[in-house]
Image (spheres, grey):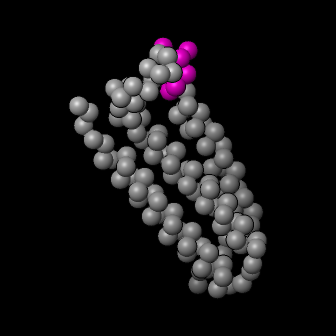
Amino acid sequence: MIKMSKASNIQVWQYITAILLIFFLGFHLAERIPQITGLTYHQSLDAENVYHNYSSYGWALWFLAAIALFHGLNGLRGIFLEWRQGKTYTLTVNALFWIVYLALLGIATWTVISLPALG
C-alpha cells in the first residue's frame, strides 16, 4: 500500500529546498560579481571563464537544477493536491510529479556531464 504524504511534510520540503535554493543560486550569481571574481561582468561571460566555471563547479549547477526542479514541481504538486482530492487523483498527481521530475533531472544531468571540449 502506498502511503500518502501529509501536507505538512510537503511544506517542510518546500522550506528546505527554498533555503538550499538561496545558497546555490547565490553561489551561481556570485560568479558574476566583479568584486568577487576580479573580472568585469562582461569578462566573466567570456567563453573561457564560463567553461572554467562550468567544468569546476558543474556539480553546483547540477544541484541548483535538481533543487529548483524539485521546489517548482513540488509547488505545482501542492497546488494540484489542494485543487482537487481523492485517492486516485492524489496517486496520479504524485506519479506525474516523480515522472516529470526524473525526466527533467535526467536532462539536467546529461547537460552537466556532456560538457564539450573548448576550442
Quadrant location of the N terminus in the rendered image: bottom right
Q: Quadrant of residue 47?
A: top left
Q: Is residue 116 visible?
A: yes
Query: As displayed, is residue 31 above or below residue 75?
Result: above
Q: Quadrant of residue 71?
A: bottom right
Disc tally is 0
Q: Is residue 3 visible?
A: no
Residue 105 falls left or right of residue 96: left
Q: Residue at x 56, y 38 (%)?
A: 24
Question: 34 or 16, which is in the foreground?
Answer: 34
Q: Quadrant of residue 51?
A: top left
Residue 25 falls left or right of residue 83: left
Residue 83 % position (x, y): 76, 73
36 in magenta: yes
Question: 43 or 82, which is in the foreground?
Answer: 43
Q: Residue at x 41, y 57 (%)?
A: 107
Residue 4 % position (x, y): 66, 75
Q: Residue at x 37, y 46 (%)?
A: 112
Q: Residue at x 52, y 25 (%)?
A: 32
Quadrant location of the C terminus in the rendered image: top left
What residue range appears in magenta? 31-38
Residue 19 % position (x, y): 66, 43
Residue lying farthest front?
Answer: 42
Residue 65 % position (x, y): 50, 48
Query: As displayed, is residue 65 above or below residue 25?
Result: below
101 in magenta: no
